[in-house]
Amino acid sequence: MPPTESATAGSPVAAGVANPAPLAVSVGLTVNGRLHRLDLDPRTSLLDALREHLHMTGTKKGCNQGACGACTVLVDGRRINSCLTLAVMQQGTRITTIEGLADGDTLHPLQAAFIEHDAFQCGYCTPGQIISGVACIAEGHAGSLDEIRAWMSGNICRCGAYPGIVAAVDQAARAG
């Protein structure tokens, strides 16, 4: 068993600091077409950088383990789980969040289709579902309802709004 440090007065353990935080690093993230400069702990996930540092709360923290898809964003047009990547790894990339899809007051076609098909209930998973749907269409994986279901399977909806989600992705794919 390795030796342990005793909690003597004035020691880091007594003060509640076992290991000091690493120094912040300067990170440049291009999110929704705008460059943001941040000083971050190098261990900060892209999800936490978006939500806690840039206050873009559309991207949701679900499982924080890459299993639910609530945190899905686009990086250079490719969908990723933002909880599983470090912000420092995304310098030099183009990150698109749900906040970056609409053009002013004009919704992205998939956002409009989600409303038309009532493809959400509680709405928590909706941003990740929409971002994943945009990528599904762009990747060419929206040729049939079965294909959409398969390629959207990494995004979980606990309310069970799947029929509306699939219908919305199908409509946007056919329109586009």
Image: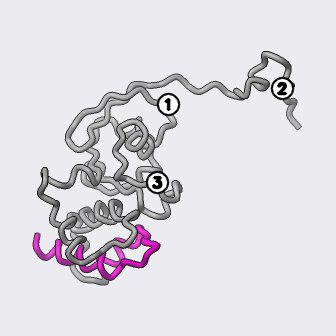
Q: Residues within 10 Å of mark 2 (few under 14, many from 20)?
A: few
Q: Tell me residue 154's x, y (percent).
A: 42, 68
The residue pinned by badge 3 equals 61
Does the stretch in magenta take in 162? Answer: yes
Mark 3 or 2, nearer chain start: 2
The front one of 41 and 106 is: 106
Amino acid type assigned to the residue bearing label 3 in the image:
Lys
Q: Quadrant of the C terminus?
A: bottom left
Q: Magenta stretch?
A: 147-176
Mark 1 or 3, nearer chain start: 1
Q: Tell me residue 28's x, y (percent).
A: 32, 31
Q: CA distance from mark 2 to mark 1?
A: 26 Å
Q: Quadrant of the N terminus?
A: top right
In the rendered image of this protein, does residue 13 appear above or below residue 101?
above
Residue occupying image coordinates x 31% and y 63%? 132
Give me the disc on residue 41.
Answer: 1
Residue occupying image coordinates x 64% and y 25%? 20
Q: Residues within 10 Å of mark 3 (few under 14, many from 20)?
A: many
The residue pinned by badge 2 equals 5
Q: CA distance from mark 1 to mark 3?
A: 19 Å
Marks 3 and 1: in contact by CB < 8 Å? no
Residue occupying image coordinates x 41% and y 35%? 88
The front one of 36 and 16 is: 16
Amino acid type assigned to the residue bearing label 1 in the image:
Asp
Q: Tell me residue 133's x, y (percent).
A: 27, 67
